[in-house]
Amino acid sequence: MMYWLDNLFGKRTNHPDFWKAYQEEFKHTNNQRVVVLDCETTGLTPGEDKILSIGAVALHQNVIYVEDHFSVFLKQKLIKPESIAIHGIVKNKRNTLTSEMEAIKHLLKFLGSSKILGHHIQFDIQMINLALKNMELPKLKNKVEDTDGLYSKFKGVHQPMHKSLDELCDEFNIPKKDRHTALGDAFLTAQVYQRLVVSL
């Protein structure tokens, strides 16, 4: 009965255990871990396009911990040929696929209360929040920072400069290995972040 009433008023209070565990993480206020996150999607239109893969890697005190990483490929019905040309993810090919719900569930466990960092990260956050909404769950609670904003500070500019990840990698002489894969882009962004925070 309570679940029906929650749905009637557009709210859900009987959240699953994995969400409750995620919320509990924020009671620990001294989390210095930074998680660099990237999503590959079917396109760039939130609400229409879907997440195809999520990659993330953690930094502890500005050191990339390669073993502390996350990677998942999602089972989605929507596949667009124009996006395949960029990220190379083909439906039911090469990768073990998991449902969106399971992917988000495991992502929340990996994130905990860490700060999320990414390049043009608001798009990725919006896509994940839409997936959470489909699961009748609230939005992510993590603090979020964008390398685009950090780069502007690095350059002494008071507005975003909208540099691409390729441009930042070129400027900091970072080899663009595994570009346009979620985990690969997360590693590249983590290296950009290291260069920026040392200089700020």
Image: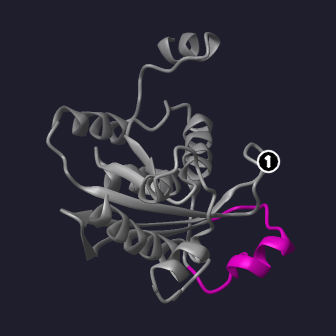
Within 10 Å of disc 1 (Cα), the crowding (few <14, some 14-19, many 20+) is few
Magenta span of residues: 75-95
Residue 89 appears in the picture as rendered: no
Residue at left offset 19%, top offset 51%: 32
**Residue 31 versus residue 164: which sits nearer the camera?**
164
List x then y, in percent, for residue 87: 68, 77
As for residue 78 lying within the magenta part, the answer is: yes
Image quadrant assignment for residue 71: bottom left
Image quadrant assignment for residue 69: bottom left
Residue at left offset 28%, top offset 44%: 113
**Residue 46 versus residue 1: which sits nearer the camera?**
46
**Residue 200 versus residue 68: which sits nearer the camera?**
200
Residue at left offset 54%, top offset 14%: 6
For this view, does 106 lie left or right of residue 74? left
**Relative to 124, residue 12 above or below:** above
List x then y, in percent, for residue 117: 42, 55
As for residue 42 lying within the magenta part, the answer is: no
For this view, does 149 lie left or right of residue 33? right
**Relative to 65, residue 133 above or below:** above
Name the element at disc 1.
loop
User: Three-letter amino acid code at disc 1?
Assistant: Glu
Q: Residue furthest right?
A: 81
For this view, does 23 lie left or right of residue 150? left
List x then y, in percent, for residue 67: 26, 77
Q: Residue furthest front?
A: 156
Q: Which residue, given by chain and number where applicable, does mark 1 sit on?
A: 48
Which colour scheme appears in the figure?
one colour
**Relative to 32, residue 132 above or below:** above
List x then y, in percent, for residue 96: 54, 77
Residue at left offset 45%, top offset 79%: 172
Question: Which secondary structure dominates the residues rendered in magenta?
Answer: loop
**Residue 146 versus residue 10: which sits nearer the camera?**
146
